[in-house]
Image: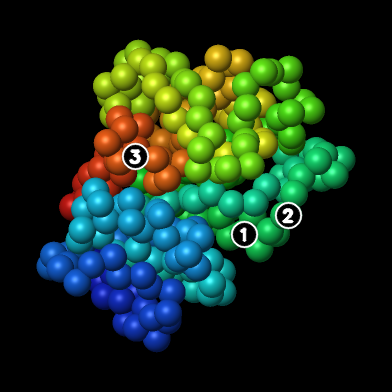
Amino acid sequence: MSLHKRSSITIFLIAIALSFVFVSCTTNQQADPVRIGISKGLPTEYYGNYIDWLTAADSSVICVDLYHIPLDSALILLDGCDGLLLTGGPDVYPGRYSREVDTVKCGVIDFKRDTLEWSLITRARALEMPVLGICRGLQIFNIYHGGSLYPDIPTDLDTLITHRCKDTYDCFHSIKVTQGSGLFGISGERNGIVNSNHHQGINRLGDGLLALARTEDGLIESIEYQDSEHMPFFLGVQWHPERMDYQSPFSLPIAKKFILEAKLFNDKQ
């Protein structure tokens, strides 16, 4: 039995004691189901879309919420997972990219979550675990790699494109995808429409990262590793695919690709 498999058994026993953090996505689980660690997936009335979206791609997936427990417990549970999903949420503290002065342009900041996700990214990299970043998830992954953000797009970027609306479920804009990129391979599309619910975005791209898609104003909407062939799977998208029509090439295909990579990771252990 491999070290990872023995660790998984230990993690499962710990998880029983911490069962409130587990969100079982199905009762029809396979013998060795894929487990996805979610940086914040509860309460489900706000974060439940991620779970619905993942299970629409694969009903056997088990989701593990990593936010509502101590940091050391979250890292232990991540060791028993096959993929990490960094979800949307509040602004990342600008001090993480040496722009403390821009805090006045931010909304609510969750310092606990910043620390948690920073640690989860570090651990996932050490494990060579696949990672998917959505909205805030893309942003903190970019910051982790030395990048920075526009702290407030309406005041810091000269653009006529609306990136955030009052009705967060009815706000869309077009994107242009780089042909041959990982996102193009997933979606099969060079152009498309995605939803938009953010007032921050990537300014300086992080080291070793590559822009895959942009809006008409040039704002980066998707990223991956430059050396995607030799690095663990990572995809970041600025939009919310879990809120979109699953038939969109920029929605469910992303979940399916992420889960496929998680299965491949599981098989290697």
Left or right: residue 232 compared with residue 256 = right
Q: Residues within 10 Å of mark 1 (few under 14, many from 20)?
A: some
Query: Which residue position is annotated with label 1?
Result: 113
The disc at residue 136 is: none
Work out whether residue 64 or residue 173 is closer to the camera in this orientation and state it: 173
Residue depicted at 62% across the width and 37% down the height: 165
Q: Nearer the viewer, mark 2 or mark 3?
A: 3
Q: Are marks 2 and 1 in contact (CB under 8 Å)?
A: no
What amino acid type is highlighted by mark number 2? Val
Query: Which residue position is annotated with label 3?
Result: 245
Q: SS class of the residue under badge 2?
A: loop
What amino acid type is highlighted by mark number 1? Arg
Left or right: residue 204 compared with residue 40 = right
Query: Which residue position is annotated with label 2?
Result: 108
What is the quadrant of residue 115 in the picture?
bottom right
Q: Note whether 77 is above or below 182 in the view shown.
A: below
Q: Residue 86 at what x, y percent from top left?
A: 48, 50
Q: Note whether 24 is above or below 135 in the view shown.
A: below
Q: SS class of the residue under badge 1?
A: helix
Q: SS class of the residue under badge 3?
A: loop
Residue depicted at 54% across the width and 49% down the height: 88
Q: Residue 201 at what x, y percent from top left?
A: 63, 32
Q: Nearer the viewer, mark 2 or mark 1?
A: 2
Q: Note whether 43 is above or below 205 in the view shown.
A: below
What amino acid type is highlighted by mark number 3? Asp
What's the CA distance linking mark 1 and mark 3? 28 Å
Q: Are marks 2 and 3 in contact (CB under 8 Å)?
A: no
